[in-house]
Amino acid sequence: MTDMNQHLDEGRIHAWLDGALPPDESARVEAHAGSCADCAALVAEARGLVAASSRILSSLDDVPGGVIPGSAAGTDQLAVLRARRSAATRRWWRDRRIVAAASLLFVAGVTSVMLRSSADQSTALRTEQTVQAPPALPESVTPASSGQGATPAAARESPAREAKVQAGAPSPAPSPVRVAATEARDSTAEQKAAAASTSFARGSALAANETRRTDSSSIGRDRQVLDSLSEASRVAQGASLQNQVRQQGAAPQRQTFEQARADAARPAVPPAAFGAGASLGPVVTTGVGASMADALSIAGACYQLQMVLENGRASAAADTVQLLDEIVPQRSDPQWRRAQRINASLTPAVLTWRELDSAMVELRIVSAMDSTIVRFGSANIVVTGRRGEVIVRPAERPDVRRVPGIHAAFALRIDCPR
Amino acid sequence: MKDDELERLFRLYHAPLVRYLTRRLGDRDWAEEVAQEVFLRALRQDSLKNERSWLFAVATNLVRDEARRTARQRRHLLVLAEQERDTVVEQPPTTAERAHEAALARQALESLVEKDRLALLMREEGLNYEEIAAALELSVGSVGTTLARARRRLAETYESLQAGEGRRAAGGDDHD
């Protein structure tokens, strides 16, 4: 309990700021802080410490580039867990079948001995039919015991889903992609779809990707799981967008975000180029293999660029950009390719992009006013629940140069506006 | 535990758990391994009461056990962080700056006592006071004080490290 006149101790202030106090006590703390200058100063200091701690700790999320890219690891982990679970279930079921078969044999044997020891001929004759019965008994348990074909539903569920994933069935709805930095993991089918639907396929990138694909045994697993997670990712991303909108409160921005979400909700968009088909939300995805494998679908894709402001919560939609596979003329570096701005909301500018490496794309926006470089790297935007709300924060900050007040940038993969 | 229950747990907690462990260990691969072990253990449970605090408590215990055996690795990571700081000179400024910040943050975090450090990292992952208390076997009433002490110590240590770096840099400049 806090007496109205009693000064606040630091622990109680932090508990209050963390929303950990019951309503009545929270009200008392608030009232006291409002009337006591010393305590108000402590509260202000505590707020600063909370923010500083978060900022300091967030810098620990930076992982050296390329070592542990952002996305497939999580899904890979889930795949491993599923595999282990399936194996365990199969083992359990196999053991059960063995036990069941042994039990039947035992019962049959005992019955047989008992019957044969019976002196009553007629009883023996009758029961002999029962003794003949055992061959039928196993049939009665066949659904459970007839081996591989009779996997229990629980064990069958996962492989079935994986098989579907392997078939490469495209997601029915698009997967908006948040990219703070690299991420680029699509399924093989998605890559093919992207390659087929765009004239921007790059032979060299394809060759490189094929090489990488063979180099990484984890790609298949990554892809298998990505599709199965895409549905939930979409939901998480939608929720995330909603929260961004809620946090911003600014009508024009809300409109833009809702537009982005509406765009993202259009069907038939292959999941992310940078963004990793992108398992977002609570799933951290990564995987060197997967991240390398999807460079193909970068060109031709459209992205809604968004900036996260210094406070980590507000973000401002900047523009929609389509990355083109056209090499910028008169540039000594053939890596530079053109990008075009769609539905431009900013002043005219020259947009170019290049792949820094297999897991990072650099986008340059050069206008008469300034020059901005946004690098999409391996970071994720992670949604975490806290204090009853959802905070979107970058797990890793991409470089956003010469943009005062911008903490991070990311891109939502959207359907290209027609 | 059913398959869909595992998925639900995974989707909800894998990312925060890996981040918590990464911050705790300074090694993403290691964090992923520990997280996987945590979920495997969860699989063996019929049901989990207070699932989030259970997962974080198991992760914390695994790390603690592991850390006893592999204190060497942590020292190695610190060395790597130092090396990273030294080598970033030739890297793009932003990368160097970030690596430097991470190294300072790691040092500052390591300066906290274990209980404070874990409480802070858990709080950053959204655990509420009851969950933190359950995971670390603290009283709920002491969590606020623990967090206040942890935050203050972290921020002050980080600032002093930064100031020390600044003075060192200034001293180096004087000699140039």
Image: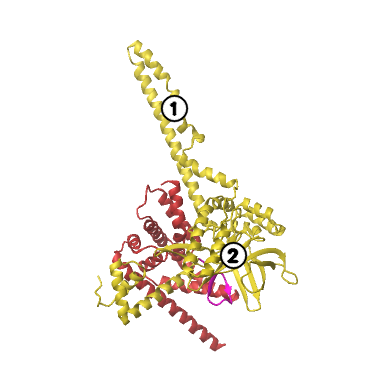
Chain colours: A yellow, B red
The residues colored magenta run A395-408
Residue at image x 36%, y 19%?
A113
Residue A398 is covered by the magenta coloring: yes
Instruction: Give the main secondary structure, helix, strand or loop, of the magenta stretch.
Output: loop
Count of numbered marks: 2
Dot 1 surroundings within 10 Å: few (below 14), some, or many (20 or more)?
A: few
User: Of all residues shown, which one is farthest toward the bottom?
Assistant: B174
* Foreground pick, B1 / A381: A381
Residue that mark 2 sits on: A304
* Foreground pick, A310 / B48: A310
Could you tell me residue A280's position as x and y percent? 52, 59
Distance, label 1 to label 2, CA atoms, is: 59 Å
Could you tell me residue A388's position as x and y percent? 40, 63
A81 up-or-down from A148: above or below: below
**Is residue B121 rendered to the left or right of residue A162?**
left
Dot 2 surroundings within 10 Å: few (below 14), some, or many (20 or more)?
A: many
Residue B100 is covered by the magenta coloring: no
A293 up-or-down from A27: above or below: above
- Amino acid bearing label 1: Ser
* Foreground pick, A257 / A157: A257
**Is residue A180 rendered to the left or right of residue A36?**
right
Residue A48 in view (yes/no): yes
Residue A69 in view (yes/no): no
Could you tell me residue A363's position as x and y percent? 63, 69
* Foreground pick, A147 / A118: A147
